[in-house]
């Protein structure tokens, strides 16, 4: 009897366990298994990449000490991908002597599932995988090779897709890359050449410092933008350090931080968000800047913060530009605003041409090779350096001649340059013998100028406009001085 | 006890009953979670290579020849990149021609030998795997006798079999020998020949000639018994007669150093010269093999000239080192700063120094090196030890694997000295 009791108990237990599995009381969170969902995500991203012609722009960063790069990628159904780029590293790869070079190469792509859906470029493409290649930059030898290279990725975890933008993360390094869908008819070479041209128009090594201006007017100095790894330094802290401590030269050493960036047709993007602090200790986060019609860059994050060169009037009197060597009123300047008569107009064009013709036809028989405007920080004066050439006794002679202008700054955007009768012996001889030069100097002295620049970010070409006659202007451009 | 037995019986009965009742309805299996992909996809741009690999590796040897890099299949501490598609074709056809087909030609078991013992996976990797700590790089890995990884495929020079051997095929023979000896052990007498001379931590700092003279074929061979075995076998198979003779030549020499005896990092050289042209302890300066012949191969190489002045037999070091410069030109700089870029050699491959003031062989003067061989006082008979090691391998391969080592070597030598890469590649390009 006891045994029957056991048997009945066992059967009851088994029955209860087996019956309990007939109905699920809890709804499934997922309607498919993880494997099926992973397969579906592979198909999803595969179709996204191939959709609408399969052409994409990738904003690609490697290490934070290196500029970012723009690549165009055209994904094909047959598993091939054409990758195009135009940058300094490709120039090295193809053995070009140019600063940047364009190249386009095909290799293979695939979406694999070793870490969720992963986009892999799993055969070598010399213009793209170079950033992941362990060989270090040129200069290392076999025994000094560290095996790190540029710290780039060639496999990317597919994160999300919104509005024709695909966000991917480098699998090994974890850096985010942004892929933006492009028109399939985009000409890769023309597109990337434009990106390079944009970079050149954004920053120029001739103007090494530009400014990020925050909503309250505080500024950060941006040094070395042309490298696309600029240093950012709060202007107010730099000044403080200079005044109080003085040991940190211009404050750069202590407060400057390098941040790398890249340029696309949409504007400028830093690799990571950057927090800036204004004079009121209010923080501003920046990362993306959109190109504005006036050539400046506007923060996408707050729509207020800008990136531009100093105001034109300040720039024209910036002692770091077009300056004479310290303590000298002669010699070779570091940079010069050079007159360009081909771009002048109105009365100034007539007077300038008359001046050069007058120099040649006068008893001096001198050819004006070039004329520069140079700012002398010490005296606060502008000088006009005329470089002339004449043939005397069968010998070609080159002469430099300096004239000096007193400067008068009117408000924030106007100024005058007044010839004060001073100059070196050569120049005063020219003034004495060439009436057309005198006429030009008189007109300059009588004119109130305002400046228009070609760009707010890289103002290297300026119109010095007569405010009383807007159709008449001098034209100067910034350049390194020619050897005399 | 009886009660316990009954409890167990009851539980078993319950389990059976549960299984019997548990199927409330006829559940059908859902769709497979595995995506049904073809072995070879004709729609892919890589179809020709994929098909050729399938037909020549997968179907024949069940080998997965992976040219699309999978970083999860690598040592992820390293920074690596994939192989180029083009070089993958080269490596695929050459591996078959120089390695699989060579063994098939020699092994008594024919194709079955590699079917049974070859690796299951060959994985191509484009870059080297650098180890900055030891200043070494990995050329290949054999993992558990299953997978062979080959590195720096992107640096292949397909018509330079020395480079191909150094970087790939020697590595494949090396790794395969590991698979073989891990399947059937080699005679332990092998381990006794160089006992006490292995250095697992600093082998990369040892010089080739020095380890040769101790009875190793390469510095890496001096790292451990098993590496010694694999290196000896691999080098014996792929080295040409001249290359093998050189190993044996270096093995028979003595080696000296300019450093003090206490300097563990001393660099050893095989010749020395003396300031008075006479051998003697007081005026020895050791010079390395490569400078002895003043051979320059790579950009950045330097050497010093030793030459005759006015027919008087004496030596003099050049003012500037000879150097090879960027662009492929070799600039030779003489003692007076002269530069020229067409060095000439005499019939003994000695550099000739051109200077009309020096009388010897018309306008060319032989550059004599009044050098004397360093004494061989390491206590080891290098050539003899290497020969003994080769003999162990020869017997083991014959007895255990029915493979004739010397025949294998001859076949490999024949194939590597006479292959047409374009013809081999055509097999892939002709795939329909």
Image (cartoon, rainbow, N blue to C red):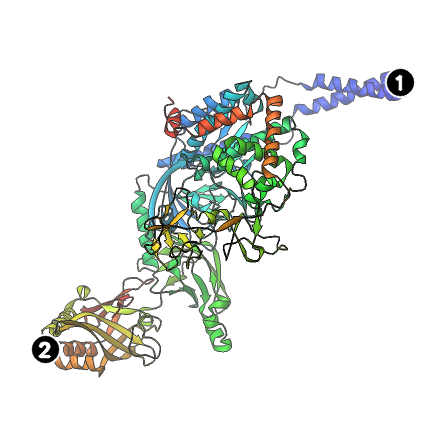
Which residue is at the far right? Answer: B1
Residue A29 seen in render: no
Relative vertical location of residue A451 with respect to residue A114 in this rendering, above or below: below
Where in the figure is residue B329, as x and y percent of width and height? 35, 49
Quarter of the figure that contains the C terminus of chain B: top left
Q: Nearer the viewer, mark 1 or mark 2?
A: 2
The image quarter in which residue A333 lies = bottom left
Residue A52 seen in render: yes
Where in the figure is residue B270, as x and y percent of width and height? 54, 47
Q: Secondary structure at mark 1?
A: helix
Estimate the spatial distance between the alpha carbons at disc 1 and disc 2, rounded to whole Å: 141 Å
Relative vertical location of residue B234 with respect to residue A231 in this rendering, above or below: above
Quick check: A373 left or right of B82? Answer: left
Seen from the viewer's position, the closer of residues A18 and B39 is B39
To which residue does mark 2 refer?
A363
Going 40% across and 24% down the picture, which residue do you hit? B42
Quick check: A467 left or right of B13? Answer: left
At label 1, counting other C-alpha atoms closer than 10 Å, the crowd grade (few under 14, some 14-19, many 20 or more) is few
Going 56% across and 51% down the picture, which residue do you hit? B267
Q: Secondary structure at mark 2?
A: loop
Seen from the viewer's position, the closer of residues B408 and A471 is B408
The subunit letter for the residue under badge 2 reads A
To which residue does mark 1 refer?
A2
């Amino acid at each position: 009897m006891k045994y029957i009791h056991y048997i009945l108990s066992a059967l009851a237990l088994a029955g209860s366990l087996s019956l309990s599995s007939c109905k699920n009381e809890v709804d499934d969170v997922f309607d498919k298994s993880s494997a099926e969902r992973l397969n579906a995500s592979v198909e999803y991203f595969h179709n996204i990449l191939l959709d609408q012609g399969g052409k994409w722009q990738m904003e690609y960063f490697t290490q934070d000490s290196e500029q970012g790069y723009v690549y165009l990628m055209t994904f094909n159904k047959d598993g091939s991908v054409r990758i195009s780029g135009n940058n300094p590293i490709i120039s090295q790869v193809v053995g070009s002597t140019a600063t940047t070079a364009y190249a386009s190469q095909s290799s293979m792509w695939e979406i694999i599932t070793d870490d969720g859906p992963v986009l892999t470029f799993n055969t070598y493409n010399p213009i793209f995988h170079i950033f992941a290649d362990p060989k270090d930059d040129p200069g290392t030898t076999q025994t000094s090779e560290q095996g790190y290279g540029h710290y780039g990725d060639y496999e990317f975890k597919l994160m999300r897709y919104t509005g024709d933008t695909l966000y991917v993360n480098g699998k090994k390094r974890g850096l985010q890359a942004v892929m933006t869908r492009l028109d399939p008819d985009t000409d890769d070479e023309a597109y990337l050449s434009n990106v390079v041209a944009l970079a050149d128009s954004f920053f120029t090594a001739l103007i090494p410092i530009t400014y990020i201006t925050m909503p309250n007017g505080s500024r950060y100095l941006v040094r070395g933008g042309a490298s696309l790894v600029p240093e950012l330094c709060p202007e107010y802290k730099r000044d403080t350090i200079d005044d109080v401590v003085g040991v940190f030269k211009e404050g750069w050493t202590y407060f400057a931080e390098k941040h790398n960036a890249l340029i696309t047709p949409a504007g400028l993007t830093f690799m990571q968000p950057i927090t800036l602090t204004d004079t009121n200790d209010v923080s501003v986060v920046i990362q993306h800047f959109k190109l504005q019609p006036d050539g400046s860059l506007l923060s996408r994050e707050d729509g207020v913060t800008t990136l531009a060169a100093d105001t034109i009037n300040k720039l024209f009197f910036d002692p770091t530009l077009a300056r004479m060597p310290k303590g000298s009123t002669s010699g070779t300047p570091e940079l010069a605003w050079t007159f360009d008569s081909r771009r002048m107009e109105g009365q100034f064009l007539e007077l300038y041409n008359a001046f050069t013709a007058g120099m040649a036809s006068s008893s001096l028989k001198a050819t004006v090779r070039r004329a520069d405007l140079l700012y002398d920080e010490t005296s606060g004066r502008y000088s006009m350096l005329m470089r002339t050439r004449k043939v005397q006794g069968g010998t070609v002679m080159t002469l430099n001649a300096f004239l000096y202008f007193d400067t008068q700054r009117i408000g924030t955007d106007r100024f005058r340059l007044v010839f004060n009768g001073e100059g070196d012996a050569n120049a005063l001889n020219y003034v004495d013998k060439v009436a057309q030069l005198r006429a030009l100097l008189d007109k300059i002295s009588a004119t109130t100028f305002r400046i228009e620049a070609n760009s707010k970010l890289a103002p290297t070409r300026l119109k010095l406009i007569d405010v009383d006659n807007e159709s008449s202007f001098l034209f100067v451009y910034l350049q390194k001085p020619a050897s005399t | 006890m009886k009660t316990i037995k009954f409890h167990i019986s009851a539980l078993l009965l319950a389990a059976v009953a549960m299984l019997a009742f548990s199927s409330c309805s006829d559940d059908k299996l859902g769709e497979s979670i595995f995506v049904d992909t073809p072995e070879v996809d004709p729609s892919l741009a890589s179809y020709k290579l994929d098909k050729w690999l399938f037909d020549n590796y997968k179907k024949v040897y069940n080998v997965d020849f992976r040219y699309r890099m999978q970083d999860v299949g690598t040592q992820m501490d390293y920074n690596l990149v994939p192989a180029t598609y083009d070089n993958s074709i080269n490596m695929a056809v050459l591996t078959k021609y120089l390695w699989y087909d060579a063994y098939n030609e020699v092994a008594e078991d024919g194709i079955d030998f590699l079917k049974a013992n070859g690796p299951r996976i060959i994985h191509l990797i484009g870059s080297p795997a650098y180890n900055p700590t030891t200043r070494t790089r990995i050329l290949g890995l054999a993992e558990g006798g299953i997978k062979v990884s080959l590195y720096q495929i992107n640096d292949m020079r397909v018509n330079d079999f020395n480079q191909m051997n150094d970087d790939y095929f020697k590595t494949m023979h090396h790794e395969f020998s590991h698979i073989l000896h891990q399947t059937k052990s080699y005679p332990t007498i092998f381990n006794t020949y160089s006992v006490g001379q292995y250095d697992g931590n600093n082998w990369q700092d040892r010089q080739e000639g020095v380890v040769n003279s101790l009875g190793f074929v390469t510095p890496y061979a001096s790292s451990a018994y098993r590496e010694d075995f694999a290196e000896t076998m691999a080098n014996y198979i792929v080295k040409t007669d001249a290359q093998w003779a050189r190993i044996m030549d270096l093995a028979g020499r003595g080696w000296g150093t300019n450093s003090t005896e206490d300097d563990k990092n001393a660099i050893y050289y095989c010749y020395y010269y003396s300031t008075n042209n006479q051998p003697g302890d007081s005026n020895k300066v050791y010079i390395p093999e490569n400078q002895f012949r003043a051979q320059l191969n790579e950009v950045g190489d330097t050497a010093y000239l030793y030459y005759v002045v006015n027919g008087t037999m004496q030596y003099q070091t050049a003012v500037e080192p000879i150097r090879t410069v960027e662009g492929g030109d070799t600039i030779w700089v003489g003692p007076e700063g002269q530069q020229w870029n067409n060095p000439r050699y005499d019939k003994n491959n000695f550099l000739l120094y051109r200077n009309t003031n020096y009388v010897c062989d018309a306008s060319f003067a032989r550059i004599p090196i009044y050098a004397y061989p360093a004494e061989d006082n390491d206590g080891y008979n290098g050539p003899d030890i290497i020969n003994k090691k080769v003999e162990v391998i020869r017997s083991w391969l014959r007895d255990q694997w029915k493979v004739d080592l010397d025949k294998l070597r001859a076949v490999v030598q024949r194939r590597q000295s006479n292959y047409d890469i374009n013809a081999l590649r055509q097999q892939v390009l002709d795939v329909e």
